[in-house]
Image: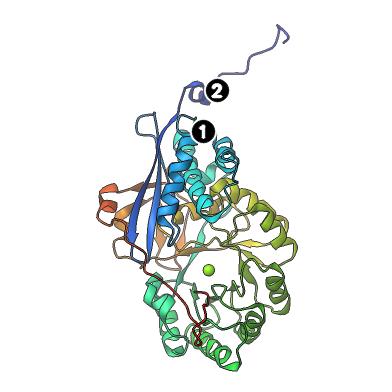
Amino acid sequence: MDAGCVCPPHDPQEAIYNQRMKITAVETLVCNARMRNWVFVKVVTDQPGLIGWGEATLEWQTRSVVGAVEDFAQLIVGEDPRRVEYLWQMMFRQHFWHAHDITRSTALSGIDIALWDIIGKIHGVPCHQLWGGPVRDYIRTYCHLGGGKMEDFYETPVEDAKRFGELALAAVENGFTAMKSMAVPPTMPLEGLRPVKRAEAAVAAMRDAVGDDIDLMVDCHARPSPAMGLKFGKALDPYGLYFYEEPCWPENVEGLAMINDAITTPVASGERVTVLEDFVRLFAARACDVCQMDLTHVGGFTQARRVAALADAHRVALAPHNPQGPVSTAASLEFGFSQPGYIICETVHEDVPWRKDVVTESFTIEPEGRIVRPHSQPGLGISINEEEIAKHPFEQEIPQVVFYPDGAIGDW
Ligand SMILES: [Mg+2]
């Protein structure tokens, strides 16, 4: 090195980075919220008061995810929490088995989100400021019919078109400008006109109830075969859905692409996809126009930012899947403020009446239009009430099973 080199001016962050800092524990807190067990991940550091929160909720796999977090802990305890990408790589690539199966990818996501929360707290800025600052003034949110009350959303029979209309109107009266329903029933790989007509009647009832200014979405839960997904899609096309979600199995990229090509309504998919290369295939095939990657499953913010870049290159919109708990919602919003392609945040607000007791959020949802503006609190801007969580310990999730009329297994 040239002896005459000029040292860079003192950087206040340098002091932080010269400090030793390490992760001392990675813990999970399970909170039963009726349909789901919310799995909160707490990353603890050796710095007084410096902790990060993430979420790794995975329905019907709570014990597995908790175990997976425990397995990852042995890799990262003792490491510097500020090396987020390094730790992501450590969790993804060490231990031989790549962590893209849904269980470990969810566990990894919970830890990654908590690490970014820590980085925000170290720098005293919200997470979205770490990624270049807000790209929009507000984020629009949408609800499930019934606000996430599982009986209304999952169990309103598609024959009851009137009820679909009533629930859609109630959402508008609650301030929402967009909402999602499950108006497509489970069907065998091939069925006739009856289920298609019923789905159409349910969507027509919602459209009649709310008018053209409200955005309606239908989630098929990947119940239909590609042939049935096409039939439903064609029947619902005239109702101008905002998006048409999982009209066939997410693994079936060709089926999704065929449907997306055949209808005007944009197809949405990606909530169950975790492998980066699978997103490449999904986008290259134009199999969806809305990417629903889930921040708590895809590999946290670190992997979501890579997927978002791929989506951006294909001009595919982002509408992350988020029926989970409050940390997941805070994460989706932070991500949304940083991503140009982000269009809307999924929310459930009435799954359990004590939702707000578990977490204190820095953002507020404006009652008119249900929009959220950026906050200025560090990290995710949330604090978790651990005593409140302790009031709702783990319970086995309520089983959700589907059988066809002949007794064969269907998709929930
Ligand atoms: Mg879905």
Query: Which percent across, then down, holds residue 348?
Result: 42, 66
Q: Quadrant of residue 42?
A: top left
The answer to whether the beta carbon of the residue marked 2 is less than 8 Å from any atom of ligand 1 is no
Rounded to the nearest angstrom, the CA distance separating label 1 from label 2 is 17 Å
Query: Which percent across, then down, holds residue 217?
Result: 54, 75
Query: Which percent across, then down, holds residue 246?
Result: 59, 71
Label 1 packing within 10 angstroms: few (<14), some (14-19), many (20+): some
Q: Earlier in the sequence, mark 1 or mark 2?
A: 2
Residue in the image at 71% along x and 56% along y:
280
Please determine whether, in this image, residue 322 is positioned above or below residue 222.
Answer: above
Foreground: disc 1 or disc 2:
1
Relative depth, front residue between 89 and 140: 89
Instruction: Answer left or right for 255 relative to 406.
Output: right
Query: Which percent across, then down, holds residue 234?
Result: 66, 84
Relative depth, front residue between 292 and 279: 279
Residue in the image at 64% along x and 72% along y:
267
Q: Which mark is residue 11?
A: 2
Which residue, given by chain and number where applicable, does mark 1 sit on? Answer: 82
Instruction: Answer left or right for 35 relative to 139.
Output: left
Residue 380 is at least partly visible in this image: no
